[in-house]
Structures are given as C-alpha cells and as structure tokens.
Amino acid sequence: MSVTSPAGFEAAGIAAGIKRTGALDLALVVNRGPRQAGAAVFTSNRAKANPILWSQQAVEDGVVSAVVLNSGGANCFTGPEGFQVTHRTAEAAASALHVSAGDVLVCSTGLIGDQLDGEVLEEGVLSAANRLASDEAAGADAARAIMTTDSRPKTTQVVVDGWRIGGMAKGAGMLAPGLATMLVVLTTDADLPSADLDAALREATRVTFDRLDSDGCMSTNDQVTLLASGASGVTPDAATFVEALTTACRDLALQLQGDAEGASHDIAIEVRGAATEGDAVEVGRSVARNNLFKAAIFGNDPNWGRVLAAIGTTRAAFDPYLVDVTMNGVRVCHAGRPDRPRDEVDLAPRATHVRIELHAGEASATIWTNDLTHDYVHENSAYSS
Amino acid sequence: MSVTSPAGFEAAGIAAGIKRTGALDLALVVNRGPRQAGAAVFTSNRAKANPILWSQQAVEDGVVSAVVLNSGGANCFTGPEGFQVTHRTAEAAASALHVSAGDVLVCSTGLIGDQLDGEVLEEGVLSAANRLASDEAAGADAARAIMTTDSRPKTTQVVVDGWRIGGMAKGAGMLAPGLATMLVVLTTDADLPSADLDAALREATRVTFDRLDSDGCMSTNDQVTLLASGASGVTPDAATFVEALTTACRDLALQLQGDAEGASHDIAIEVRGAATEGDAVEVGRSVARNNLFKAAIFGNDPNWGRVLAAIGTTRAAFDPYLVDVTMNGVRVCHAGRPDRPRDEVDLAPRATHVRIELHAGEASATIWTNDLTHDYVHENSAYSS
C-alpha cells in the first residue's frame, strides 16, 4: 500500500532523534533497479528550502537512486550551514548505499528557520540504511516518519496489468501548491525513462496536487518525486501510465485534504461553464482562499453571496447576472439572484460540494479546499512555540 | 468630528426599520452648497452591488447633492428589483430635498443576496430628510446609522486654515479594498471643482484605504465619497488639500483596522528597500493575506519563517538571502537566517509592527492588517444565520 508496493523498492522509517518526542522522523526510499529513473516537481515558492535547492540539481540528469526525507525541521532559511547539512545527508546515504551523492534527493519538513543537526541526520541515514526492507511494514514506517502535524500517514497504490504505482505523502498545513505540494514519493516498477516520468508527473500533478488549496499558504519545501525501477519489465503506453499516476496522485491529494489542520469540512469547488480551464481554476482558487466563505462553511452557513464576491475579484470571463451556485445539491443562487432558500442546504456532512456554473463557456475544474475553523487558528497560533 | 464638521453640510441618522433590532440603519448627508461638487471611488470587485452601479452613473457629472446610506442589507445580487429599490431611494431623497435624483448617491451595506423593502427605504429617507441638522449630534447619528458589525462609529475631522474636512466610515469585515474600502463619506467646505476632488481622492485613497487589508476579502459594496460645499470660500492649493485629505483617510482607515472583526492585533507591515512601490505593496499584501502568519501573531508567536514563505509567493524583486525581518523592534531574521532569539519579541500589545527589509531598492510601503483569531472565525461563521 505504500512506496514498497512496486517491485524494486526498499524503504525504512526510523526515529533518528530529530524530533524531541522520539517519534519516527527519518525515511529512506531506495530504488534497487534495474532502472533508476526519477523525476520531481518542486514548490514554485521563490523562497526555497535547502533540500529543494539540492534536489533540483540532483534530479536534473534523470537518475535517482534514493530519497532521504526528514520531519522535525524544514531546513529553510538556515543559510550555507543548512545547505551543508543537506549535502552531508546525501553523502551519508550515498556512502551507505554505494551510489553517487548526486543521485540522492533530500526532502525536509517542519519549522522554517531552525538549524538541523548534521550529525544526527548522518547517523540516522546510516541506521535507516541498515533497516531497509521491501515489505509492507517498511513502507508504512517510511510514511509515518515524514508526518508533522498530520494525524495519520497517507499512502496509496494502483495496480495495473503487470506493474504498479505506490506512494506516500505528508502534509496538513501550508497546503497551496504552486507546482507540487508537500512531500510526496511515488514509486513504480513500470519500465520508463526519466523523460517520460517527468512528462507524466507534470500532467498528473497539474490536475491533482495543484488543485488542492487548503489554506492558501504555499510551502517552501513542497516536493513530489517519482521513481521508476523497471523491475516489472513492462513499459505501459503513456496515456495508461498518466491515468494510473493521476489516480495515485488524486488519492494522496484527497488524503491530504481530509487531514488538513483543524478542518471540519472537505470542500470540492467545482467550476463549470468557464471560458477556459485557467479561468475555472482561478475562480475556484479565489473562492477557496476566501476566509469569509471558509468560515461560513465551518458555521454550516450556505452563504453564496461570499462565493460571488470572491468570483468578482478574479479576471475570469463571467457576467455576475448569469452565475448559478449550488451547494450540496441545492441551487441557492440562480442568475445572480436568490433561488432556493438557504435553509434547504444541509452542510452538516464533512464532504461539501459547491458547484459554480459561470455560463461563460465549456471549460471546468475542481479545486479542493477546507473550511476555516477554530481548530485551524488554534493549531497555527501555537505551532512553533 | 464628523461629516457635519465642515460648513455647508447637514446630516441625519435614523431607525428606518430595515434592521430587525430597531437600531439606527439609515443615514442622509446633504450638501447645501453653494457648490455641490462630488467625487467617489468604488470597489474594483467585478461583482458590484446595485447602489454601486447607480452611484457610478450618478457621480459622473461631478455634481452630488446628497448621499443616502443604509445598513441592514447590501442590495447586492438582488437583480433588477434590487436596482429599482436603489433608484426609488434616490428618487425619494431628490423629491424631499428638491434636487435631481441623478445627483443623489446611494450606499448599502449588510448581507449579500437579501432583497431590501423599497417602501421602508422610501419612508426612511423622508423621515431622515425631516431631521436634517448641521450640528455635531446629527453627524454622530449618521455615523452610527451605517454600522453593521462595527463595535463603534468611526469619524474624523481635519481643520486647516479657514476650511475643514470631515468624515465617517463603517467597516469591520470584508476589509480588502480594490480601490476604496467600505462605506466612507468625506465632506469639505473647501471650494474645489469635482475634477480636483476626484484627483485628490484617488491620491489619498491609494495610500490609505487601499493599503488596508484586514482579511483579504474584497467587498461588493465599497464606496468612498467626497463632497465639497465651497462654503468656506477658500480654495486650498492641491498639495495642501491632498495632504489634509490623506490625513483624514488614514485616520478612518486605522479606525477600521482597530475595529476589525474579532482581531486582537493591529499589524503594520512595513516593507522597505523594495525595487518599486508596487513591489513593496505586493510583498506587504502577500504577508497580510497569509493565514499562517496571521494565526501566529494571534498566538504571540514571532514566526518569521511564515513571513519569508509569503514573500516567496510574490513576483517582487528580492533575494531570500538578503531579507531582514524585524518584529516589534527585534530583528529575528537577518540575511535570510535566524538572528535574535524569537523569545525576545513581545507580541502582547495590540499594536504590532513587522518591518521587512528587502535590500532590493529604495521604495517602501506599509500595509495594515489584523491577526486571524477564534473570534474572527466565530463572527464570520454565524453572520447570516
């Protein structure tokens, strides 16, 4: 059910002592081949963490042998010392696995601005390398070791004819990816070169992680990595692979949404009838980032006026007096005017569906977000203290 | 201290029965001349309320005799019937005051999507016209009648040599103006034509109301109106007038910030060393709209990593490893790395100052915002129910 599901992969998750609590905090995922192809997409935040700066270089040649991931510290805005810690982490993994450090990606997550201890990480990597295994428990440990405020690990697998995709993800806040979101590692035993992996990964993330906007806050450390071992000996056609990869990415994205910090509603904002897909995304994202709308959903209040006010701030093509808004199946606004009574809408369930019909074209997109709750404020007012 | 402070103006604030609570809900401000010049700036939200659509037309010729303002309903997304209610309101004022309906502006505030009762408004306007007065109490009543979730009325006056500016404002949520914010009426007895008023108003609002971003949510009903009676007989030079007007606007903007829904901190985000003023505003606004930063300030947590993560999402010119962040006088981040310990920062006071030094140029700007609190979530999860 995780990164060890496809053939050719080993993983480990250990407590390296980075987290003061003694919880699992370091994961290692290794591609045993025969192929060691990799691709990754990164946060588009211009303030990038040290592991992002490292991994961007390391993935360039399309060869990735291993990924080291730590929770307990983001290693972001930690200066040249911080970059050295990332470099040292990659060197430790390379030495233990007998691969090149340039083929080891590094991901970190936790508080920004705290220095990580290079020695602790180095020892952790060696210890993890000694515990590598290809069984389900090893994949589960790895998924658990990358958790921060996550309440549960997130894993997935997609089984196709003769080959598989596995994956794990962490993330519960700062969920508004620019290109990718949070830490995600996907593995496959399909036999594909890195250029094909890269194209498939960009296509799959564009309509999954990139449509997730829990709290409008884009992380400095987001990274989605895809590794292919070729161990199945099967080379699927591009469309089939993209479809399977998209399924895995969507599954993980929805698990991230379902575990978003303090959230009490998982909201799917479906925008239809847009002039372009870009317009649909812009409209959905504007509503998803509107605190008044998000607070209203928390209060089980189908306040469609706030939806229209949010649409009005976009550059999308629309006429306010053509817009329909439907909440959980009840059309509360028709042609920019009140339609069914608000009290017909039942917002008690966690799953919430808001459909916006712009009547401006044929394009559509769905953005996934969460409500704004007391618990969100509480968790994020106390995180670093 | 309010719109009746300059010579030539009368006002009234009454309970017309729009609010079910029986509170004051209708204000009338009348310019008795000799000049009846006016200018206004409006929300840049593309979903505009009916009174905005009306007032945009009415102000075009630069002649404004009166402004009717109601709380208890925004008259937004209420269709042609809603526009007729606005028209009828202006007609009622015109008839009572013996002026043209095209010289009467209308402003509404309250819940979006609720139909206002035209008859109630018409009777209210007639009743207000009978109670017009030029004394301080009349100005105070008008300021009170436009309140919604405001906890107190907001008024200002600026006294210059021989002439004055007076003003009132309402607003406690949806505070993120595109051009103007909330309902504001400014009066002056300076003798200036409407073209000069318009230029001065745009210059003053650009650096005051437009720099206020309490919750990132742009209203559909924002309007700032400036009326000049010429009753002082004094024509100030343009620079002097702009300076006085900017003082009045800043005073009202800071009163809006100080009364923002549920806020426990008034945060001034000062961005210095930007390549352009536009960059400074973009950086300040990005930080002001970052829910994680806002929740951290609520928790008295000087989490500068969230400041840098927010800067990273902008297009402004900057190098992450040159940025300094100072919170309430303590530089917690220097050159993109940890500087003074976080616990030296005292965030207990309501007034909070965050200074961001980009080291990318000479331009600067300050954005005013608030923290994200339990009370904000509470108030906005229960507003329409």
Image: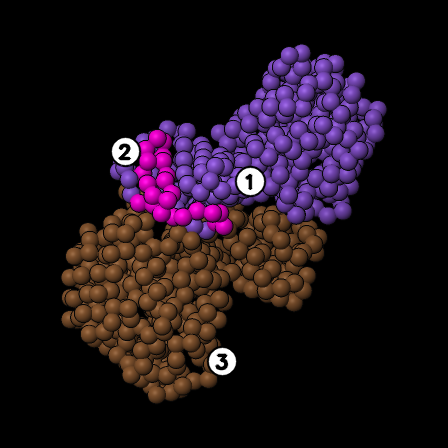
Chain colours: A purple, B brown
Check disc 3 and give the amino acid type.
Answer: Ala
Q: Name which residue lies at 26% across and 79% down.
A: B32
Indicate which disc residue B239 carries: 3
Determine the CA span between mark 1 and mark 3.
Answer: 44 Å
Residue B229 x %, y %: 32, 80
Residue B306 x %, y %: 58, 47
Closer-to-camera residue (B359/A20): B359
Residue contact at pointers 1 and 3, CB within 8 angstroms: no
**Upstream in sequence: badge 2 or badge 1:** 1
Q: Is residue A87 left or right of residue B155?
A: right
Which residue is the site of mark 1? A176
Check disc 1 and give the amino acid type.
Answer: Ala
User: How packed is label 1: few (under 14 Cα within 10 Å), some, or many (20 or more)?
Assistant: many
User: How packed is label 2: few (under 14 Cα within 10 Å), some, or many (20 or more)?
Assistant: some
Q: Name which residue lies at 41% across and 41% down.
A: A359
Which chain letter matches label 1?
A
